[in-house]
Amino acid sequence: MTEINKAFWQDAINIPAEIRTASVPTNLQPHEIQIRTHAWGFNPVDSAVQKFPIPIMQWPMIPGVDVCGVVSRTGSSVTNFQQGDRVLATAVGTITNDPRHGGFQTYVAVDAKLACSIPARFSFADGAVLPLGLGTSAHGLYAKQYLALDVPRDGPLKHTDRWLFVWGASSCVGSNAVQLARASGLRVVATCSAKNFDYVRSLGTEVVRDYNDAGVIDDLAALLDERDVAGIFHAAGEVKTSAAVAAKMKKKPFVCTATFISDGDIPDGVTAKMIWYTPPEIIFEETTAPLFEKFLPAALESGEYKVAPPPYVVNKKGVEGIQEGIDTIAKGVSATKIVVENP
Ligand SMILES: NC(=O)c1ccc[n+]([C@@H]2O[C@H](COP(=O)([O-])OP(=O)(O)OC[C@H]3O[C@@H](n4cnc5c(N)ncnc54)[C@H](OP(=O)(O)O)[C@@H]3O)[C@@H](O)[C@H]2O)c1
């Protein structure tokens, strides 16, 4: 049977995307696998690449990062996957400027290190929730230039009395940061909207505050000052809020942020760094690879690591349904991952 690779092309910013074919990525590098996509997760960046000239990116591109599907080919040096395996993976085409790596197509080539088997009970939509949120939080928590926490390589680490503060824990990045921090043996203080308190607690957060409350900065600074804090992980919203908490604290913990830092956001005396989750760092040997290879498959299988936030499937129209996924994430979500299925 001849394979047809239908793809979602963004040829330039501020023009409608076009659905047309792309070459089936059969020319795999030795370390790559080809995935027949069955679901895509949506991230704020998927909307941004339709509107803004992001310096490291080039158009035309096939955007899309979060994919889940079935392995359809393997590169010559890949030993941990075979044809037919159900996997989630991170597609990096917006960064490599290689259409073979764009997620929003029927067949995508990904680095096997950025793929992970999913349990048989998982839907493809479940698997599409995790890749970028998990990878970004892992990079911020574990890479030496950020929070440098201990990686749970062979299973969750022993619990300690050290704490991580996560601002925006109901976001996709934040939900993964909470779960990974717990797996690394830390205790968690977090913020989200009051309606998401139960959800954020269900991920292992012990102390949660509403970021909309008046006085929340002072309240957090005081309660964090009573604890041994490993750092602040800023997952969503403007980083100046987390930086203000750090500034009010006696110890001024390091702020690692998934969101952009603008001029004036970081007061004197506070150190903050934005997570730069791009190749070659994306395949950070010390963190992402061991997590995806060892910890994550086992923790997903046992249920110890949750699919969070829960997926919301907006349609099952395949590539034709992608723009609706992007439009939905662009409007903003709350403790939800937008997914489109590709039957
Ligand atoms: N640096 C990187 O490499 C990288 C990678 C991935 C994502 N990002 C960025 O990280 C951010 C989060 O991405 P995501 O996919 O996790 O987003 P998301 O899930 O779409 O974010 C939605 C969540 O953000 C929360 N939120 C909104 N405003 C907030 C505020 N002021 N304070 C605290 N929480 C707030 C909402 O919480 P409530 O509903 O509880 O109010 C909601 O649950 C985005 O800015 C994204 O562009 C960066």
Image (cartoon, grey):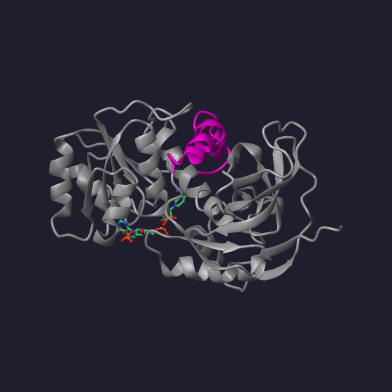
For the point 58% across and 37% down, the residue is 280
Please state the horizontal and vertical placement of residue 319, each as a whole percent of the image.
66, 66
Is 47 drawn above or below residue 300 in the view shown?
below
Q: Is residue 185 visible?
A: yes
Q: Position of residue 340 (x, y in %)?
A: 57, 64
Q: Nearer the viewer, residue 342 or 280?
A: 342
Range covered by the magenta-colored residues: 276-305
Which quarter of the rendering shows the C terminus? bottom right
Q: Residue 13 lies in magenta, yes or no? A: no
In the picture provided, is 2 more to the left or to the right than 253? Answer: right
Task: Give me the residue at 65% from left, 59% from top.
Answer: 62
Q: Quadrant of ligand 1?
A: bottom left
The residue shown at (57%, 36%) is: 283
Q: Which is more toward the observer, 58 or 302?
A: 302
- Give the residue at the far right of this rendering: 1
> In the shown orientation, is residue 157 left or right of residue 188?
right
Residue 146 appears in the figure: no
